[in-house]
Amino acid sequence: MTPTSAGRGWIVSPAFDLLFLANLGWLLLLLPGFATRADTAIDFWQIYFLTLPHRWITLVLVATDVDRRGAQTRKLAIVAALLAVLVVGAVLGTGAFLCLALVDYVWNAWHFGSQHAGVLRMYSRKVGGGIEWLERWGLRAFVTYGALRAAGWATGWLEADAAHMPWLTAIDFAVLLIPATLLLTNLKGISRERIGKLAYLASVCALYTGFVLSLHFGWGSLVVLFAAAGSMFHAVEYLAVVTHYARRREAVGSPGRFRTLARYWLLFLGLYVLALGSVGVYMSRPDSGLVVVWQGLNLWAAFVHYAFDGMIWKLRRPETASALGVS
């Protein structure tokens, strides 16, 4: 079986990219009556059968795929062990994970931005366009700002002092210049080959622009909606990238356990999501007696996910770019 072929300008295909990378389905949440706008980013189905699996799949990938580990096996193991010590030390020292929850939120915000910037970089390697440093760092800053701004809005401390509001207004609208500039620089010299990249960028920018504007004007129901859409977008996008990689690994890269797994990837992914989600539901129940253990495991898996993703998906490494079909 040959690696997945992609038309010029698309990572996989128009349908796959628009549905699972650009995630255009999130726009349906804006339709009247489609969503209650009372849903949250920790809605039952999303947390257990989307967010949870996308975090733990990184561990599966690193454990089974020699190509993703490469020469970093020892380094990855050390990172995972140190993060385990950190989580266990926190619960033994304080009896809770409150301090690490703050670390998780901030790191996750940066991780969201980094992932979006990484996918945008995949498109840029295929078709060019835009300004590299702005796409690499501007998109990270924009997405991270939205998440941190949401934390301030939720706690109320940013709006508590009216004297801060003019500054906050200026920062909000200054940050919104980033997506506008990203889109304008990619519209310059636009061609049919760049439609996929532009669709992806427009979707990300529209979502986080709506998020920042909702936070700015205090539109609470829309804040919840955009937060849920952002979490869904991120998890689906990551599972799509891993799926694309798995399909290519059937024919490229080193033999081994992951190549065998890749041959049955969709079946594996379906069973994996169902099994992990079901375990999560059970262990999260107060009567299971395992709530603290489950919280600690998930916090560790989240930290490992953030750290490993920054180590195993570097497109500047020729073998990684080639494995993803964007060399």
Image: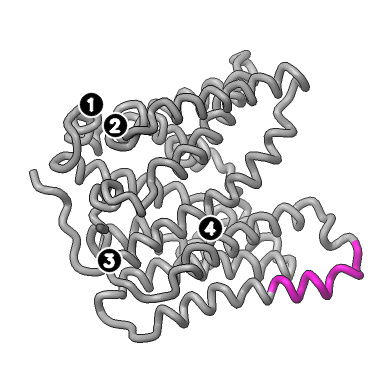
Pointer 3 or 1: first along the chain = 3
- Disc 2 marks a residue whose amino acid type is Asp
Q: Position of residue 280 (x, y in %)?
A: 50, 26
The one nearer the camera, 39 or 153, is 153
Report helix, strand or loop for mark 3. helix
Pointer 1 or 4: first along the chain = 4
Residue under label 2: 65
Residue under label 1: 257
Report whether 25 appears left or right of 229. Answer: left
Residue under label 4: 35
| Quadrant holding the N terminus | top left
Q: Position of residue 21 (x, y in %)?
A: 36, 58
Highlighted range, magenta: 161-172
Q: Magenta span has 170?
A: yes
- Disc 4 marks a residue whose amino acid type is Ala
The nearer-to-camera label among 4 and 3 is 3
The one nearer the camera, 8 or 292, is 8
Q: Position of residue 166 (x, y in %)?
A: 83, 75
Report helix, strand or loop for mark 2. loop
Q: Image quadrant of residue 197?
A: bottom left
Query: Mark 4 Cα within 10 Å, few/some/many (few <14, many 20+)?
Result: few
The one nearer the camera, 73 or 231, is 73
Residue at image position (53%, 56%) is 113
Residue at image position (61%, 21%) is 85
Query: Mark 1 Cα within 10 Å, few/some/many (few <14, many 20+)?
Result: few
Q: Is 57 rendered above or below residue 36?
A: above
**Residues at marks 1 and 2 touching, judged by CB atoms closer than 8 Å:** yes
Report whether 268 appears left or right of 148. Answer: left
The nearer-to-camera label among 4 and 2 is 2
Residue under label 3: 126
Residue 31 appears in view: no
